[in-house]
Amino acid sequence: MRIRYKKWARPELESAPFYIDNPEEIKGKWHETFKNKAPINMELGCGKGSFIANLAVRNPDINYIAVDLVDPMLGVSKRNIEKVYKENGREIDNIILTRHDIERIQLFMSKNDVVDRIYINFCNPWPKPKHRKKRLTHTKQLNLYREFLKDDGEIFFKTDDDDLFKDSLKYFEEAGFEIISKTYDLHKENIFDVNIETEHEKMFTEEGKKIKALIARKIKESNHGQ
């Protein structure tokens, strides 16, 4: 999703107590940063933040890391998080917003930063063959996530793109994940306990596109490759 430059985004982000600009400095210390022992979930490519805001405010006993790369997008996400928490009468105490290139996620996440669940919503499908390794669900990326996703940890994935979904089913298998649930029409067959719609999801649904979704579980290291 492209977004126009917003001159207020950088100053607002830098002043937000729940924003971290240099996550490399937190590598190996994410649990200490949250200052509690609650499990950590993560959204890769949080966009405008409405999904993670509504998810986190409903689950105060879970900590959330939301990652994106573009300042204007993160600025909008920051404002949406503040809006949702204010509407619910809650302090922002279980979410950290951060900026980084997800392709280099190993630079700010380690095996000590144990994550229970990862959300990937409507990532760039990169349709050209020469670009497919950039997909957030590509085998090489999934192998990076395995380093910090706990054994039996889950990845929740949603997309409107048929080819990306088909290829991702193969990627998850190659990277040692088990598909425990999938659907080619999420709004007809909801596989999640609660489906929180993203901005993209609402737009694509209004266009008549079916939403594809899956839940993949990490196979334990001892069983991977058997």
Image (cartoon, rainbow, N blue to C red):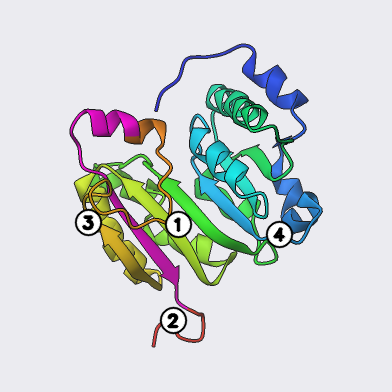
Tags 1 and 2 in contact by the CB under 8 Å rule? no
Residue at figure coordinates x 56%, y 29% from the top left:
77
Residue sitting nearer the eye, 158 or 110: 158
Label 2 sits on a secondary structure element that is: loop
Q: Is residue 203 magenta?
A: yes
Q: In front of the other: label 1 or label 3? A: 3
Query: Label for residue 166?
Result: 3
User: x, y (%) of residue 161?
Assistant: 24, 43
Q: Does the magenta stretch include residue 90?
A: no
Quickly name the residue at label 1. 141
Q: Which of marks 1 and 3 is nearer the N terminus?
A: 1
Q: Is residue 86 above or below residue 51?
A: above
Q: Is residue 113 above or below residue 126?
A: below
Side (left or right) of 160 relative to 42: left
The amino acid beneath tag 2 is His
Quickly name the residue at label 4. 38
Q: Which of marks 3 and 2 is nearer the N terminus?
A: 3
Quickly name the residue at label 2. 224
Q: Earlier in the sequence, mark 4 or mark 1?
A: 4
The amino acid beneath tag 3 is Lys
Residue at figure coordinates x 67%, y 55% from the top left:
61
Residue sitting nearer the eye, 169 or 157: 157
Identify the image quadrant of the N terminus: top left
The amino acid beneath tag 4 is Ala
Graded by Cα atoms within 10 Å as few (under 14), some (14 to 19) or many (20 or more), the crowding at tag 2 reads few
